[in-house]
Image (tube, rainbow, N blue to C red):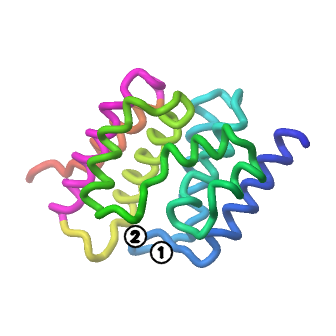
Amino acid sequence: MSAISDLARAYHFAAVRHLSQKRKGKAGEPYINHLTEVADLVATATGGCDVDVVIAAVLHDVLEDTPTTCEELVEGFGARVAGMVLEVSDDKALPKAERKRLQIEHAPHLTPGAKIIKLADKTANLRSLKKSPPADWDAARIADYVVWALAVAEGLRGTNPALEDLLAKAAAAMVTPSA
């Protein structure tokens, strides 16, 4: 199969698996919008030269947020793609605070492709949080998320300067100037 066919299959797979999911923001966007934004950021950051990383970006939340197994990803998209998806996936059996701590701890040790996906995911999340924050998130919770996202990004420093700059700009946009 061609790279374009593989990418199209990944988008279809992700769309089906995330079909009923919505983003947490007030706007309740379809979850696939997040996946397409992350994939677009990754494709741009890699110059479109590594389709496996883009495919893994499309699929980056399927292990975490759907009943998809790693074996399904290996079978459908290969070991490299499945490995990157696994690297950027949280273990939902752990408490949220532990998952967040582990993201910071593991960030410097990710493979290059997984680092790019993680940077793109955090960038997209910050942009979404700015545009459409969840109704139940107050300013303190948003500020905590920004601090945490920057801590994860610190462990990814040196991965892709252009993507790191986009993340820094997204985080800076979250800061509301005092009146």
Amino acid at dot 2: Gly
State the quadrant of the N terminus.
top right
**Magenta stretch: dominant SS?**
helix
Q: Is residue 108 above or below residue 15?
A: above
At 64% across and 46% down in the image, what residue appears? 82
- Give the side of residue 170 with respect to residue 9, left or right: left
Q: Position of residue 83 (x, y in %)?
A: 60, 42
Q: In the depicted view, which residue is nearer to us: 91 or 162?
A: 91
Q: Is residue 56 in the magenta section?
A: no
Q: Position of residue 12 (x, y in %)?
A: 75, 62
Q: Are marks 2 and 1 in contact (CB under 8 Å)?
A: yes
Q: Residues within 10 Å of mark 2 (few under 14, many from 20)?
A: some
Q: Residues within 10 Å of mark 1 (few under 14, many from 20)?
A: few
| Image disc number at residue 25 | 2
- Give the side of residue 109 with respect to residue 29, left or right: left
Amino acid at dot 1: Gly
Q: Is residue 156 in the magenta section?
A: yes
At 27% across and 41% down in the image, what residue appears? 172
At 71% across and 27% down in the image, what residue appears? 49
Q: Which residues are magenta?
A: 139-162
The local secondary structure at tag 2 comes to: loop
| Image disc number at residue 101 | none
Q: How far is disc 2 from disc 1 in space, using C-alphas?
A: 5 Å
- Give the side of residue 151 with respect to residue 79, left or right: left
The local secondary structure at tag 1 comes to: loop
Q: Position of residue 53 (x, y in %)?
A: 64, 37
Q: Position of residue 138 (x, y in %)?
A: 19, 68
* Residue that badge 1 annotates: 28
